[in-house]
Amino acid sequence: MANEPKKKRKGANTSLVFNNRMYYFLIPALAMFLILWVYPVLQLFYYSITDFNGINYDFDFVGFKNYIKIFENGTLVNSIGNTLAYAVVTVILSNLIGLGIAMALNTKIHFKGLFRTCAYFPALFSAIVVGFIWTYVYMPSSGMIANLLSLFGLDGTAFNPLGNFRVALFAIAIVEVWKAFGSTMIIYLAGLQTVDESLLEAGRIDGCTEWQLTRLVKLPLISSTITINVILNVIAGLKAFDYSFIMTNGGPGKSTKTLMFQIYEIAFDDQKMGRASAFSVVSFFVIILITVFMLYFMNKREVEL
């Protein structure tokens, strides 16, 4: 009949997901992304070619003078060296400790939940709290480690890692490892629990040792988890700022001045926001290049495994 409603064509897509109006819900998130990320980044590039001091907006364009300065005075090379050394130590130790504890806690042991909680507990503290705690731990004469050395008849007053420019960077890197290995452990635990137990049992029947099972079965099967943890730790290491600021203030000398600390110092202590912006631009590309290289290398390793 003429007034009878038309039947929907069989197979017609009626899902709201494919309705064009659903894309309107992306507008708030896209607007926030443009305002809070894209615009500041573009503004950073703009200020990097000016002599803006962060206070007075009556500034002049200086071209690439800021970039030339940061390469001439050696601050960039020093901060990149410190940052890379810090990142290497934190990445290696965080992953080795996290993976080792994850494998130990993935076995059938008593109080497994309690041990997991204790291992993850340091990750719950803020960086400021952790920095102040470890400043006391490293304190010469009256610090925790100094007191322990004194109990064993050693000279606790000579223990001052934060005051020694040769070891200060590694001392604060240990603090980062102490805080970060719990998060790394949780990710490794999640990966290890996806390993099929039947594969391990088959290996044991064939006479494989636990080390062979770990090296030839477990590690290849969690290679994607290893990639995730390494990349996350690399990014965290390259963005290091908190502990060098809280515990050593970049000292002694320039031994703990990382890329982020150097940017902070130029911007707020020297009040050279334009030069700090140029430093940030260079740091941005350094971090991007290292991250892309690590992703390529780790993905290639996954394919080989």
Image: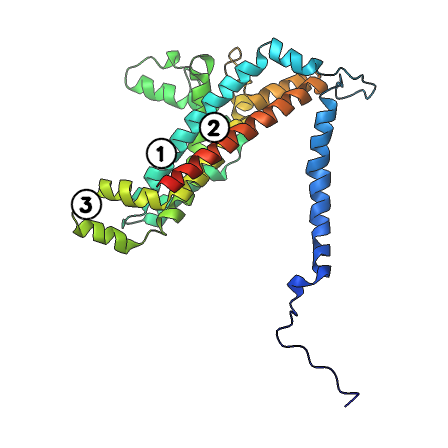
For label 2, the residue is 133
Q: What element carries label 3?
A: loop
Q: Is residue 227 above or below residue 283?
A: below
Give the residue displayed 69% in from the left and 81% down from the top: 7
If you read the primary sequence from the N terminus, does the residue marked by circle 3 or circle 2 appear first?
Answer: 2
Which comes before the other along the chain, label 3 or label 1?
1
Q: Which amino acid does label 3 sit on?
A: Cys
Side of 244 relative to 53 (left or right): left
Please determine whether, in this image, residue 100 is positioned above or below residue 9: above
The amino acid on which the numbered mark 2 sits, given as a three-letter code, is Ile
Are the residues tagged 2 and 1 within 8 Å (C-beta)?
no
Farthest-out residue, right? 58
In the depicted structure, whether residue 157 falls above or below residue 129: above
Q: In the rendering, at what x and y percent does residue 21 appear?
A: 73, 60
Q: Name the residue under label 3.
A: 208
- Crowd class of label 2 (few under 14; some 14 to 19; many from 20; radius 10 Å): few
Q: Residue 96 carries which label?
A: 1
Quadrant for residue 259, please give it: top right
